Image (tube, grey):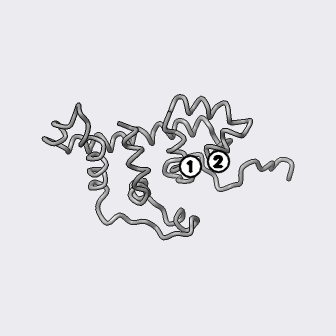
Amino acid sequence: RTDQFIEWCQDNPTKRVKLFSDSTQDAREEGRTRVQLNTAKKNTYMELARYIFEHDAELHAEWLAKPQPFVAATQRRHTALRTRYHEQVKRLGQTGAGLTFDELLRADRTKGLISEIARDSPWFSVLHGWWRSNPTYNVAFSTADPDQDFAAQA
């Protein structure tokens, strides 16, 4: 079901950005206006839960009878994905903060660890693309350029 969560987010980038808290700074840096959702996040979670559970053969009847627990479960899954992402980013530390997934795979100092993280967290590459520069999600993010040798410059 996490695959459907990720798929919906990929198919709905405007809602995804707002669901994951679009910031004015991110919008300015990307040369666009800040995305504001016209409906409450709760309604967006309802739409996401509908996408996940409406065609779920195992849970379809329960979804139709009482959708609210599924909406809550979808919110908890978002929180769990964020928590897991935090854990993985902490493993990378400042070494990988702000780098793209591809840059992490190519860098000698991170490629082994990022391969291990990708095995442990199959959605990490997608989430990292969305969250790597969002301090709400990436607590190790730095605005400094990677690969700077401050010691040599001192």
> Which label sits on residue 41?
none
Q: Residue 121, image x and y in percent? A: 50, 33
Identify the residue shown where x is 43% and y is 56%. 13
Mark sitting earlier along the chain (2/1): 2
Tell whether label 1 touches label 2 (CB within 8 Å).
yes
Q: Residue 5, image x and y in percent? A: 37, 43
The answer to which of 25 and 53 lies nearer the viewer is 53
Identify the residue shown where x is 62% and y is 49%. 98
The vertical placement of 71 against 32, above or below, is above
Q: Mark 2 points at which residue?
A: 99
Q: Residues within 10 Å of mark 1 (few under 14, many from 20)?
A: many
The vertical placement of 71 against 91, above or below, is below
Q: Which amino acid does label 2 sit on?
A: Leu
Left or right position of 5 against 104: left
Where disc 2 sits, the SS reads loop
Q: Which amino acid does label 1 sit on?
A: Arg
> Which label sits on residue 132?
1
